[in-house]
Amino acid sequence: MNDTNALSNCRLAFIGCGVMAEAIIAGLLRKQLVTPEQIVGSHPRSARRQEIHAKYGIEMFEDNREAALAVQPSGPDTGSVLVLSVKPQRLLRVLQELKGSIHQDQLVVSIVAGARMETIADELLHAAVVRTMPNTPAQIGEGVTAWTPSAAVNETQEQQVRAMLDALGKAVRVENERQIDMATALSATGPTYIFLVMEALIDAGVHMGFSRHVAQELVHQMILGATLFARESHKHPAELRNMVTSPGGTSAEAIYQMEKGSLRTVLSKAVWAAYQRAESLGERK
Ligand SMILES: NC(=O)c1ccc[n+]([C@@H]2O[C@H](COP(=O)([O-])OP(=O)(O)OC[C@H]3O[C@@H](n4cnc5c(N)ncnc54)[C@H](OP(=O)(O)O)[C@@H]3O)[C@@H](O)[C@H]2O)c1
C-alpha cells in the first residue's frame, strides 16, 4: 500500500453500499489507497452485504450505527470518514439513526444529491461535513466530482476527501453549495446530454446506411478522441472548430444547420433548467 497518501491512517465507513459506494470502494482498493481492513460498509440486505464482502473483503454491517462506530478514530493521528451513500429519499431516516453515533473527529462526506450540509449537520449534531456531487462515469474511475467543505472541516480532512474522490476520477473543489447545484446541472447531469447527442449521431449514421454497430464504434471513438484532443491542445473549442472548418466544406455545412436549429441556445437552456431544478430539490431537504 502507498504509505504517503492522505488515507493511510484513515478508516472509512460507507452507509448504503449501492452503485456509487461500490465505485468508490473499488477505486480506493484498485489504487491501493487503503487496505480492505480500513473500510467497512452497511447495507440492509444480506445478499448485498455478502456480495460486497466477497468482492472486496471488507467488513459489512446490517446496522448503520455499527458501521459508523466500527471506524471511530482510535487516536489523534488516525482519521475517520463516514460516507453517506444512500438515495436522497432514505437520507433523513438514516441521519436520525446515526445521530449520537458520530465521533467528534469523524468527517461526514455526503454524495447524496440535493442534500444540504446544514440539514446533515443539524440532523447529526455534527459540524464537519463535506458535500460532493459525482457523476456516472465515476463507476469506471473516469468521473468528475465537485465538492465543498463546511467551515468545520480541517486541512487534513480535506486531503482525505481529495484522495477519496480521486478514486472516482477527477475531484474539483468548488466555493459553496450554490456551485454544487451548478455542478449538478453541468457535470453530474452532463453525461445524459452527451448520451443524447451520442444517440442522435448514431441514429444519423444508421440513417445514412451504416450498420448500428459500425455507427456506434465510429461515434464512441470520435467523442472520446475529440474530448482528449480538446483537453490536450489547451485551445478554445471555437479555435479547434475553425481548424477543421474549411470554406465550403462539410463542417461549414453541418455547423450552419446546427446554428439554424439553435443547438447552442437549447444546450444553455437545458443546463439552466437543470440548475433551477437542482436548487428547488435542495430547498425541500
Ligand atoms: N449513480 C450516480 O451516478 C450518482 C451521481 C451523483 C450522485 N449520486 C448520489 O449517490 C447516492 C447513491 O446513489 P447510487 O446510484 O449508488 O444508488 P443505489 O445504488 O440505490 O445505492 C443506495 C444503496 O443504499 C441502500 N439502502 C437503502 N436503504 C438503506 C438504509 N436505510 N441504510 C443503508 N443503506 C440503504 C440501497 O439498498 P436497496 O438496493 O435495497 O434499495 C442501495 O443499495 C444517491 O444519493 C445519489 O443521489 C449518484
Image (cartoon, helix red, strand yellow):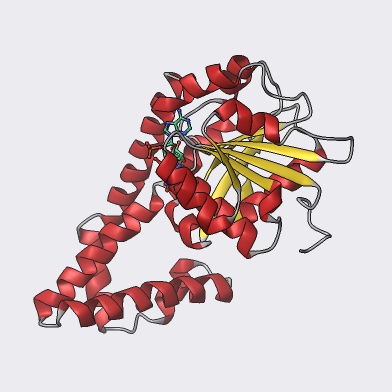
In the image, is residue 280 above or below residue 17? above
In the image, is residue 220 above or below residue 4? below
Which percent across, then down, holds residue 145? Answer: 55, 49
Q: Image quadrant for the N terminus?
A: bottom right
Report the residue at 58% width, 52% height from top: 25
Report the residue at 48% width, 37% height from top: 43
Which percent across, then down, holds residue 61? Answer: 56, 36
Q: Is 13 left or right of 272, judged from the image as shown?
A: right
Q: Is 133 left or right of 247, judged from the image as shown?
A: right
Q: Is residue 130 visible?
A: no
Write down the quadrant of residue 214 in the picture.
bottom left
Which percent across, then down, holds residue 22? Answer: 50, 51
Residue farthest toward the right in the current orientation of the protein: 76
Ligand 1, image quadrant it occupies = top left
Q: Is residue 252 visible?
A: yes
Which percent across, then down, holds residue 26? Answer: 56, 57
Write down the quadrant of residue 261 in the picture.
bottom left
Report the residue at 45% width, 58% height from top: 137
Q: Is 199 left or right of 164, judged from the image as shown?
A: left
Say how many tags the image has: 0
In the image, is residue 179 above or below residue 146? above
